[in-house]
Image (tube, coloured by chain):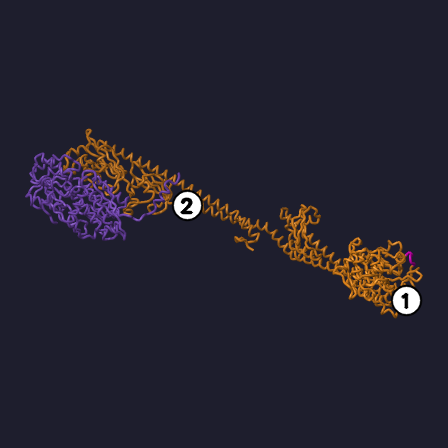
Chain colours: A orange, B purple
């Protein structure tokens, strides 16, 4: 299963990813902020620096121009120059168009003088002496200019009036950019000429080229008003015949404003630049540095950030891997363990041992888990043991019940009493795993219980010795016979009234069960075991049943012998005994009774069994079966049972009613009712187990004709009821045993399922469903109490829920 | 410090398609020859209006209007230069018409040539304007022709043997034509007995005129700009210098009130409205309609300069400086207001000159001078 955003479902992988993201996202954020702030700071610093540089350069230019003005004025005031100028102008005369003065002393002297000055002043590129009228260049250090006229030139027209600086301009006479300082030449208070000096722009460029920490690509330069480089030597004029245009230059020149920014320079290279319009100089000054170089420290910073980031990310990855592993490993281990346990392998907690050593919550979890697993294993072991024990008990009980049935069948089929008795003691000893079994019958006088059958060598020796015990004597058999009750010694050493038989030295438990028929005690069944407390209540019940059957058999045998054997095969008593001995279920017993009754003068019969509480009190009545002779008028469906219910108080006690219409004991309404059903005479017989006196139910036999039942029939009904009681008891025990066995089988099945499936929800659900199905419940729920005692989990197949704090200690320890 | 103007810088970055053809005009609107300047602007605006009214010019399949950018050069060299630079470097014009006076046209032409932007000077006659330049053209004839015409006129028509010249030595046009006249006159057997100069702006010519009077000359040649002529003639008459005075095309813009003193003088020029061709007649009437005066030769030449310019753009179908230059260079013959011009790949037309006589305050056609 994958997360829908594509995250892996593995806990470890997710933890790793989360840890790495937790570390890397802030790292990237901080890195990016650092980078951008660094870039911004650097850019601002550079712009500040460039602006400062531009301002400094502007001041330097102004200073330089100012000093040039002073120099030119000083030169104009120089006596030598004035003297020769006066002479020259005098030689030439003041008239216009006079012939040039070349070759005159004044001219040559002036030339020599100006040449000397020019040589001394590197900031001058040409010194000229112009006539005040017409602007003719009389003398120039550049002789080619002599004889030309600067009459319309600003430096001449303005220079005649006062010292004047003609800012950068394209000189028509020079054919290049020039900057000219001019000052009037005075003679006797009159302006006689103009001294003009073209400044050496290379010197200006030198000022611009002085580096001010602008790096390798930084440069400062001047532009004239019309987008031309002032330093044409540096930039070349032909490269930009129509002027140079950059954003910085155009802002400064066209908009005449100062500023700074990032733009492409004249070579189309991105630069950071500061630009200034030099108002008094008619120039723009630009200071620029290539963006690439300017931002180099930021790039270095970026690389450092990236590098450090990668290293940290790597370290974080390693640490995250380790932490994620440490966190997830025990959980994964527990998950694996619980998976194995869910698959039924409960001995897997060994893998948790390292985790359990931890002192943190995971350690607590592991210890709790381990505790839960251990307790669960214990519970399951115990459950299995109990199931095994119960199974063994049940098997034993089943065998014993089968023995009881076998004894019943033997009693019905074996008419030879000796054979029957020996068969019984052998079956009982063998099937019950006993040390010894013996049968005593009371002699005709009734003083002694004489051993008639005994198992093993001890039995044979005692028979040979005509072993007998006094009824009511100090023996368990004697006591059982005299008291008509079972005597049980679970530890023979403790039993006061016991015959310590030297032939049976290993006896630890002994039980003597009376053989009772009606009011008579026929003898006793004596069983002995080498184990202490060998007899459970179930054993006692089954053995008592055996004893009862033996008693019936002995009684029958005696009756058969009394009524001379010829009748035995056709005797209804024989058939009753035979049918009941063969019946193993309640229905079969009921059917045997009805079949037997049908063979008599009766026209109907009802078999009813009392429903008893665990305490033995009658809680209700089950009608096991009803027979009615053919052709008899029938009531409406259910009327029989209604009538029976009405008559229950009457029926549940032994009575004989010769005419229901005349009997005062029967309520008047019931009499009419019974008559409508065709019942005139009625006999009820309780089904009483003689050994215990317990009434199992009753038989209600009726006839269509009034009058008494024959004594034979009545005796038969009595015997039938007596033997049916024993058969019902046996069938009840057998059914109970089978039901118990079925339940135990299912419990074992559930137990198996529990151990094979360890999913809690599935476990609880299975348990509830299986148990509910087994006991036929409509619904059920399971409470699992947390340590606080409050119910947290509920599973069930029915409604109803309770919460409470009444949980037991085991559940608290489980800490589910 | 914040990034001042950074946004503005970015905003300036985009280039736009030209929606018009920018043509620069450099005219002496102020200074010593403002009439010539005004005539230049008048004619330029008239020509452009006519072109634009006709739908403009087809450039790259698109009809574009002409946009005029007028700069005053103050009749100063350095201003002419800066005007040319401003128009080329900052306004980005495709071509320049002007300056008119040779003293301004020569340095401006140097700038245009260097920037490889075509420049047509309508009125400049000094050979130096176009000499050795590929991007500079003119509409006027050149001074050697004009100087010869006037020298021969002096000898042949006026019968002069001794000539006197007064000229502005500081002005290329004046100086150039004066020297040519001197040369031709002497070559033709005459004698230049006085060759007097002055410099631009001077107002007192009495010394030079006195020397001329004393020289015995029988004709006075004044190759100076129209604004200087009235004072010079007036001062000459004042000192009794009563000899025939002749001039050159720079007299063209002489205004009517100045012409009284010049009665009977002759000067060479580019066209005569009274013998105008139908093309010239149409121009004259348009001009008169627009400005209420007869166009002078500066106006006529300027009008023709725009004619040449539009012819060049039409022929190339493009309006970039190089194409316009190629278009101008490929024009061999053009019939304009100032007559038929034939170009011989020098940028100078070969065309006839006219000699006008001032009679009754009017310029009257006197004779034609073929090249």
On the image, which quarter does residue B90 sit in?
A: top left
Do tag 1 and tag 2 residues touch (Cβ < 8 Å)? Answer: no
Element type where label 2 sits in the image: helix
Any mark on residue A296, and which?
2
Any mark on residue A562, and which?
1
- Looking at the picture, does residue A377 appear above or below residue A301? below
Q: Residue furthest bottom?
A: A566
Q: Position of residue B76 (x, y in %)?
A: 21, 39
- Magenta stretch in the rendered image: A470-474
Q: Position of residue A310 (x, y in %)?
A: 49, 49
**Chain of the residue displaying label 1:** A
Q: Residue furthest top?
A: A188
Distance (Cα) linking label 1 and label 2? 136 Å
Return the residue nearer the eye: B237 or A285.
B237
Q: Position of residue A117 (x, y in %)?
A: 24, 36
On the image, which quarter does residue A505 sit in?
A: bottom right
């Amino acid at each position: 299963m994958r997360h829908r955003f594509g995250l892996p479902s593995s806990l470890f992988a997710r933890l790793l990813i989360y840890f790495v993201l937790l570390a890397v996202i802030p790292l990237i954020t901080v890195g990016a902020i650092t980078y951008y702030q660094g870039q911004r700071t650097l850019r601002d610093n550079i712009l500040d620096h460039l602006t400062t540089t531009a301002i400094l350069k502007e001041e330097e230019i102004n200073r330089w121009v100012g000093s040039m003005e002073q120099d030119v004025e000083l030169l104009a005031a120089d006596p030598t120059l004035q003297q020769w100028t006066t002479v020259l102008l005098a030689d030439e005369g003041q008239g216009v168009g006079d012939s040039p003065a070349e070759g005159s002393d004044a001219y040559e002297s002036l030339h020599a003088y100006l040449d000397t000055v020019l040589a001394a002043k590197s900031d001058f590129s040409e010194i000229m002496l112009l006539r005040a009228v017409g602007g003719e260049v009389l003398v120039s250090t550049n002789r080619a200019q002599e004889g030309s006229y600067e009459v319309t030139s600003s430096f001449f027209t303005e220079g005649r009036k006062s010292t004047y600086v003609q800012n950068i301009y394209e000189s028509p006479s020079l054919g290049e950019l020039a900057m000219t300082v001019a000052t009037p030449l005075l003679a006797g208070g009159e302006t006689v000429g103009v001294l003009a000096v073209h400044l050496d722009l290379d010197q200006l460029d030198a000022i611009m080229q002085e580096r001010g920490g602008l790096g390798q690509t930084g440069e400062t330069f001047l532009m004239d008003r019309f987008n031309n480089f002032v330093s044409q030597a540096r930039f070349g004029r032909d490269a930009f015949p129509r002027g140079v245009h950059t954003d910085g230059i155009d802002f400064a020149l066209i908009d005449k404003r100062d500023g700074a920014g990032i733009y492409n320079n004249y070579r189309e290279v991105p630069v950071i630049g500061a630009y200034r319009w030099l108002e008094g100089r008619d120039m723009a000054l630009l200071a620029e540095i290539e963006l690439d170089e300017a931002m180099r420290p930021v790039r270095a910073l970026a690389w450092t950030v990236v590098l450090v980031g990668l290293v940290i990310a790597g370290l974080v990855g390693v640490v995250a891997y380790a932490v994620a592993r440490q966190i997830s490993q025990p959980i994964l281990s527990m998950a694996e363990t619980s998976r194995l346990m869910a698959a039924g392998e409960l001995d897997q907690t060994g893998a948790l041992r390292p985790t359990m050593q931890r002192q943190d919550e995971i350690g607590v979890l592991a210890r709790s888990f381990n505790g839960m697993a251990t307790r669960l294993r214990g519970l399951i072991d115990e459950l299995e043991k109990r199931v095994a024990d119960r199974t063994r008990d049940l098997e034993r009980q089943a065998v014993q019940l089968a023995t009881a049935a076998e004894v019943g069948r033997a009693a019905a089929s074996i008419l030879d009493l000796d054979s029957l008795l020996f068969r019984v003691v052998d079956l009982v000893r063998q099937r019950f795993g006993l040390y010894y079994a013996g049968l005593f019958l009371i002699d005709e006088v009734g003083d002694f219980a004489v051993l008639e059958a005994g198992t093993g060598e001890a039995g044979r020796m005692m028979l040979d010795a005509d072993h007998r015990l006094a009824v009511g004597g100090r023996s368990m058999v004697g006591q059982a016979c005299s008291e008509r009750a079972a005597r049980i010694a679970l530890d023979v050493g403790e039993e006061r009234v016991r015959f310590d038989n030297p032939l049976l030295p290993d006896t630890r438990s002994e039980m003597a069960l009376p053989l009772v028929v009606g009011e008579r005690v026929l003898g006793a069944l004596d069983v002995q075991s080498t184990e202490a407390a060998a007899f459970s209540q179930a054993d006692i019940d089954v053995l008592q049943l055996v004893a009862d059957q033996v008693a019936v058999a002995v009684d029958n045998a005696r009756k058969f012998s009394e009524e001379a054997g010829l009748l035995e095969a056709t005797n209804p008593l024989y058939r009753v005994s035979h049918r009941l001995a063969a019946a193993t279920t309640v229905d079969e017993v009921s059917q045997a009774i009805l079949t037997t009754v049908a063979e008599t003068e009766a026209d109907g019969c009802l078999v009813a069994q009392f429903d008893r509480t665990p305490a033995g009190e009658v809680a209700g009545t089950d009608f096991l079966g009803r027979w009615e002779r053919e052709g008899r008028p029938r009531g409406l469906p259910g009327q029989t049972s209604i009538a029976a219910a009405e008559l229950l108080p009457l029926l549940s006690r032994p009575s004989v009613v010769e005419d229901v219409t005349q009997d005062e004991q029967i309520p008047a309404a019931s009499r009419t009712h019974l008559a409508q059903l065709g019942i005139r005479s009625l006999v009820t017989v309780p089904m009483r187990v003689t050994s215990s006196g317990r009434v199992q139910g009753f038989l209600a036999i009726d006839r269509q004709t009034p009058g008494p039942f024959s004594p034979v029939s009545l005796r038969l009904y009595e015997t039938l009821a007596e033997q049916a009681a024993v058969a019902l008891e046996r069938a009840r025990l057998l059914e109970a045993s089978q039901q118990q066995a079925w339940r135990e089988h299912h419990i074992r099945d559930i137990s198996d399922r529990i151990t094979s499936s360890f999913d809690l929800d599935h476990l609880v659900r299975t348990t509830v469903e299986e148990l509910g199905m087994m006991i036929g419940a409509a619904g059920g729920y399971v409470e699992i109490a947390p340590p606080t005692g409050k119910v947290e989990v509920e599973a069930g197949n029915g409604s109803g829920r309770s919460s409470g704090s009444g949980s037991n200690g085991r559940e608290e320890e489980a800490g589910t | 410090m914040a990034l001042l103007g950074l946004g503005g810088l970015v905003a300036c970055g985009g280039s736009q398609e030209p929606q018009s053809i920018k043509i620069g005009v450099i005219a002496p609107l102020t200074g010593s020859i403002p009439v010539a300047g005004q005539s230049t602007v008048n004619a330029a605006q008239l020509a452009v209006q006519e072109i634009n009214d006709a739908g403009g010019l087809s450039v790259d399949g698109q009809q574009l209007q002409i946009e005029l950018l007028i700069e005053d050069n103050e009749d100063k060299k350095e201003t002419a230069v800066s005007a040319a630079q401003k128009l080329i470097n900052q306004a980005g014009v495709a071509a320049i018409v002007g300056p008119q006076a040779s003293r301004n046209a020569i340095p401006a032409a140097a700038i245009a040539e260097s920037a490889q932007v075509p420049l047509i000077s309508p009125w400049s006659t000094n050979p130096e304007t176009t000499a050795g330049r590929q991007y500079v053209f003119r509409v006027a004839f050149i001074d050697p022709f004009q100087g010869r015409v006037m020298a021969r006129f002096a000898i042949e028509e006026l019968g002069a043997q001794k000539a006197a010249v007064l000229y502005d030595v500081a002005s290329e046009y004046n100086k150039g034509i004066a020297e040519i006249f001197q040369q031709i006159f002497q070559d033709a057997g005459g004698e230049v007995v006085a060759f007097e100069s002055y410099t631009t702006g001077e107002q007192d010519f009495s010394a030079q005129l006195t020397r001329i009077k004393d020289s015995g000359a029988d004709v006075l040649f004044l190759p100076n700009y129209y604004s200087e002529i009235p004072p010079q003639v007036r001062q000459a008459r004042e000192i009794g210098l009563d000899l025939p005075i002749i001039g050159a095309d720079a007299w063209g813009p002489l205004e009517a009130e100045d012409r009284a003193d010049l009665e009977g003088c002759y000067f060479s020029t580019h066209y005569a409205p009274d013998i105008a061709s139908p093309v010239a007649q149409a121009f004259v009437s348009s001009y008169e309609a627009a400005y209420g005066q007869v166009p002078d030769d500066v106006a006529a030449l300027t009008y023709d300069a725009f004619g040449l310019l539009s012819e060049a753009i039409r022929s190339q179908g493009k309006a970039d400086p190089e194409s316009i230059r190629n278009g101008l260079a490929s024009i061999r013959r053009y019939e304009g207001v100032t007559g038929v011009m034939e170009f011989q790949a020098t940028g100078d037309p070969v065309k006839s000159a006219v000699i006008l006589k001032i009679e009754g305050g009017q310029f009257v056609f006197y004779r034609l001078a073929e090249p």
